[in-house]
C-alpha cells in the first residue's frame, strides 16, 4: 500500500517538493557555512520523495549543543516557512476523504521540517 501511496504522492506534488528541497540544499552548499543546512535540506528532499511507510525518529546525533544551535538557526531562517507550507497543504488535503492519507504525510513531515538536525524519516 505504501508503494501506491508514494507513486500517487510523487505524481501530485511530492516530486516537485522534493526537488525544491534538493535544489535549495545545493544552493546552500555553495557556502561553507551553509553546508550543514544544505545537507539537511537534501536529506529532507529525499525523504519527501517517498514518505509513505516511513516514520519520524530522533536522530542518533541529537541532543548536543551544536544540534540545538543549528536547529534554532534553521527555524529562524528556513524552518518556519517550510512548516507552514506543510501545515497549509495538510489542512487543504484533509478536507476530502481521499486527501486524508496525504495530509497525514504532511503532518508527519512537520517535525522534520522544523527540527531537521534532531529528527529524520526512517
Image: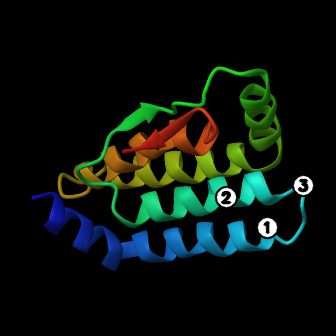
| The quarter of the displayed image where residue 118 is located | top right
Q: Label 1: few (<14), some or many (≥20) within 10 Å? A: some
The reply, left or right, for residue 120 in relation to residue 29 is: left
In 3D space, how far apart are the residues under numbered discs 3 and 2 (Cα atoms)?
11 Å
Q: Earlier in the sequence, mark 1 or mark 2?
A: 1
Most extreme residue toward the left is 1
- Give the number of the disc on residue 33: 3
Q: Are marks 3 and 1 in contact (CB under 8 Å)?
A: no
Location of residue 43 by image quarter: bottom right
Name which residue lies at 30% across and 47% down.
54
- Cβ–Cβ under 8 Å for marks 1 and 2: yes
**Residue 45: horizontal and vertical position, in percent?**
53, 63
Please, is residue 85 above or below residue 79 in the view?
below
* Disc 2 element: helix
Q: Residues within 10 Å of mark 2 (few under 14, many from 20)?
A: some
Identified at 48% across, 42% down, the residue is 120
Q: Which residue is mark 1?
A: 29
Quarter holding the C terminus is top left
Image quadrant assignment for residue 1: bottom left
Residue 39 location (% of width, % of height): 67, 58
Q: Secondary structure at mark 1?
A: loop
Q: Residue 11 bears which disc, if any?
A: none
Residue bearing mark 2: 39
The vertical placement of 6 against 73, above or below, is below
Residues under numbered marks 3 and 2 in contact, where contact means CB atoms less than 8 Å apart:
no
Q: Is residue 59 left or right of residue 40?
A: left
Colour mode of the rendering: rainbow
Taking the spot 16% from the left edge, 65% from the top edge, the residue there is 3
Disc 3 from disc 1: Cα separation: 8 Å
* Element on which disc 3 rests: loop
Camera-side residue: 55 or 11?
Answer: 55
Amino acid at each position: 500500500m505504501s508503494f501506491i501511496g508514494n507513486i500517487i504522492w510523487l505524481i501530485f506534488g511530492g516530486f516537485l517538493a522534493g526537488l525544491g528541497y534538493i535544489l535549495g540544499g545545493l544552493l546552500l552548499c555553495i557556502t561553507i557555512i551553509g553546508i550543514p543546512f544544505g545537507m539537511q535540506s537534501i536529506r529532507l528532499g529525499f525523504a519527501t520523495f517517498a514518505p509513505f511507510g516511513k516514520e519520524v525518529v530522533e536522530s542518533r546525533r541529537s541532543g548536543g549543543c551544536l544540534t540545538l544551535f543549528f536547529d534554532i538557526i534553521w527555524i529562524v531562517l528556513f524552518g518556519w516557512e517550510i512548516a507552514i507550507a506543510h501545515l497549509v497543504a495538510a489542512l487543504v488535503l484533509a478536507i476530502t476523504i481521499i486527501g486524508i492519507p496525504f495530509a497525514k504525510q504532511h503532518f508527519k513531515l512537520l517535525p522534520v521540517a522544523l527540527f531537521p538536525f534532531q529528527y529524520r524519516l526512517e
